[in-house]
Image (tube, rainbow, N blue to C red):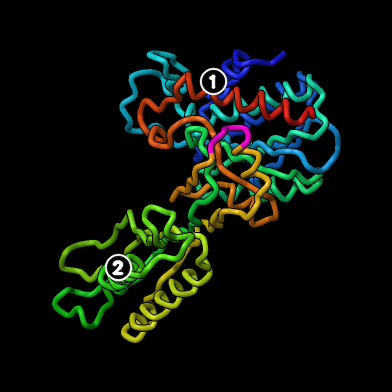
Amino acid sequence: MPDLATARMLLDRLVAFPSVSRDSNLDLIEGVRGWLEAQGISAQVVPSPDGRKASLYAQVGPALPGGVVLSGHSDVVPVDGQAWTSDPFTVTERDGRLYGRGTCDMKGFDALALAALVLAKRRGVKRPLQLALSHDEELGCIACIPMIDAMAALPRASAVIVGEPTMMKVVTGHKGGMAYWLRVRGYEVHSSIMHEGVSAILEGAKLLAWVNEQNAANRAARPGPLAAMFNPPWTTVHSGQISGGTAHNITAGACEFGIDFRVVPGEDPDHWRQAFYAKVAEVEAEMQAVRPEAGIDVDERFVVPPLAPETQGAAEALARALTGDNARHVVSYGTEAGQFQVRGWSAVVCGPGDIAQAHQADEYLTVAQFRAGWDFMEDLVAGLCK
């Protein structure tokens, strides 16, 4: 019968696949599919449009509605430039911690979910347990959408547990997200006659000034009841990278930078999208009044819906019953729970590990949290057998 040792073996296997988001994850997905098949469980693979990556979903138990989805992602962030004290793609146990890239975010949960799927099959659950394993969560939580849509072929589950690290606390809300990459096209002239050219840097700075204005206004406003739960309790607008220009005495011909939004539940993400594009259009018009060749190209990287706390949500009730956690928890980062919820599933975030360890050198998951995650899975399966 699958147990904690099975989950630990699976964690070793999963971490050994260097499934960094910029690279293919097909080896991992094929490894998971093959292992499930060896346990008598068929899995459906959902390839990406270019065929370089894939997601996977599976089900055990009767073809009835009212089951539970365990949702995780297969990709991890890079280790480049990080000072690891052990091989990041080999799980190393020391001092009660399991070190390795993805042990916390979130292959620890994935391993537990895979072992739970086999446990559910062996015990003969009366309601189905489903697994959803996506790719590219670290690039924006959008590659899961075709997988979620494909899962419509299965009986609709009553609850989705997204196992991002929450220290096994029940997170019922998170912010949404939108990310854009802007390429500002100026017109180069000598800086002594800058009025005859268009500086991509100075025009881009108008958009960055707008970012600061939005943050100041949002911070000063009184938050609504949903927003008040978050830290910070307002929608934030951010830019973290910028490059541009050829020389100091030339008006910049190009400037590139990113702008992203983290939108609190209760606010319409489309409102922020429209406001952003309106400002871009305003600045672009000013640029083209000087040089028609100038302009701004916007690449929309992703849009992630927020997770809003549900009223009498099935996922929340289930997760609270399994964990005993009755406190209210929300987070300011985004997860795939929002994608499930906006498509009609009841969803929460609950998984082992501390988000503070995610993406770090010497990322780790404590043995105690891994064990707590397995206790959760055993109790979940027991409930599905009733």
Task: Give the camera-side residue of 336 and 294.
Answer: 336
Give the structural element (helix, strand or loop) at label 1.
helix
Q: Label 2 crowding class (10 Å Cα cut-off): few <14, some 14-19, many 20+?
A: few
Q: Which residue bears the numbered disc 2? A: 216
Is residue 75 visible in the rendered image? The answer is: yes
Residue 332 circle label: none
Find residue 371 and name its label.
Answer: 1
Cα distance between the residues tagged 1 and 2: 44 Å
Q: Is residue 361 magenta?
A: no
* Depth check, front residue: 270 or 15: 270
Q: Assign the magenta stretch its main secondary structure.
A: helix
Q: Amino acid at mark 2?
A: Ala
- x and y percent of residue 205 in the render? 28, 69
Asked which secondary structure carries label 2, the reply is helix
Where residue 242 sits in the image (x, y, percent)? 31, 57
Residue at image point 25% right, 62% down = 245
Image-based side of 41 in relation to 261, left or right: right
State which region is magenta: 321-325
Tell me if mark 1 has few (under 14), some (14-19) or many (20+) residues whose alpha carbon lies within 10 angstroms of its own: some
Q: Is residue 196 above or below residue 205?
A: below
Rendered-image quadrant of the N terminus: top right
Q: Residue at x 66, y 26 (%)?
A: 379
Above or below: residue 228 compared with residue 7: below
Q: Quadrant of residue 255?
A: bottom left
Q: Residue furthest left?
A: 192
Position of 119 relative to 306 (above/below): above
**Which residue lies at the image location 45% right of the left edge and 25% below the top edge?**
365
Amino acid type of disc 1? Arg
318 and 80: which is toward the camera: 318
Q: Report which quarter residue 198 is drawn in.
A: bottom left
Q: Residue 351, position in %: x, y?
A: 54, 34
Image x and y of residue 221, in percent: 35, 70
